[in-house]
Image (cartoon, rainbow, N blue to C red):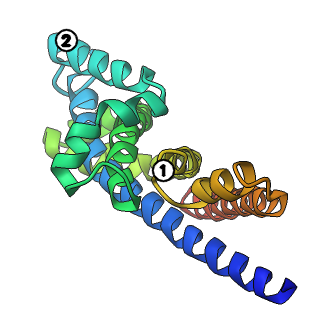
Amino acid sequence: MGVLANSTMTSVIMNAMQQTLYMVFWSTLFSVLIGFIPAIILTLTAPDGLHPIRPVYEVLSFVINVFRSFPFIILLVLVIPFTRMMVGKAIGTRASVVPLTISAIPFIARIMENALRETDPGVIEAAKSFGASNTQILFRVYLKESVPRILNGIILLIISLIGYSAMAGTVGGGGIGDIAIRYGYQQYKTDYLIVCSVILIIFVQVIQMVGNSLYKKLS
């Protein structure tokens, strides 16, 4: 019976790990790709940007701040109609990618904006003196100089999404959080709760170590 129980637990945990990795991978990819757009607009239209447009910057910055202020669990419920429209259902691993992505876009957009705007003004002025266009400065100066900082922000995003994915599991999203709640909490199986917690800690530690290593190399 003990062997069977261990086999069942291993199977359940492995399946949950795959679901968590699925949610984190796709929500990270989509949020970075989509979040890059407002980050660029904010950088360009900022008061010290290449093409300052204060109303555009203020409005977009306000929208990002509003979405960042929503607790994830509330956002998860608010976007249910949109989630159902996008993937055909409101619960499940695939469905959880939608609210995870929506919650991550303003987060990574702000991080990217800050990373881009930390570029040395002297380097930007030097590029202008050589006759570089705004597009060239944006991609060959701003973006190139900001790659290590952006990477660091993406690592923070991934770690945050691991926590959010566990929260999504409490409302039918699957993954490690779902197992921790269904087996560890509701069925009083402490071993499941401990294993799930350890796995999440290992995930975070490994990602942070890899991120630190890449940051050092790129810097």
In this rendering, which labeled residue sits more in front, label 1 or label 2?
Answer: 1
Q: Kindly identify which residue carries mark 2.
A: 54
Tell me the residue at 25%/46% (across/down): 83
Secondary structure, mark 2, is helix
55 to the left or right of 210: left
- Does residue 96 appear in this view? yes
Residue bearing the label numbered 1: 154
Pick whichever, 36 or 75, lies toward us: 75
Asked if the residue under mark 2 is in contact with the one under mark 1, i.e. CB atoms within 8 Å, the reply is no
- Residue 113 seen anywhere in this rendered image of the structure: no
Label 2 environment density (alpha carbons within 10 Å; few <14, some 14–19, many ≥20): few
Given residues 55 and 156, the one toward you in this image is: 156
Q: Quadrant of the N terminus?
A: bottom right
Residue type, mark 1 in image: Ile
> In the image, which disc is placed on residue 111?
none
Q: Alpha carbon of mark 1 to alpha carbon of mark 2: how far?
A: 27 Å
Badge 1: how crowded within 10 Å, few (<14), some, or many (20+)?
many
Determine the residue located farthest toward the right in the rendered image: 2
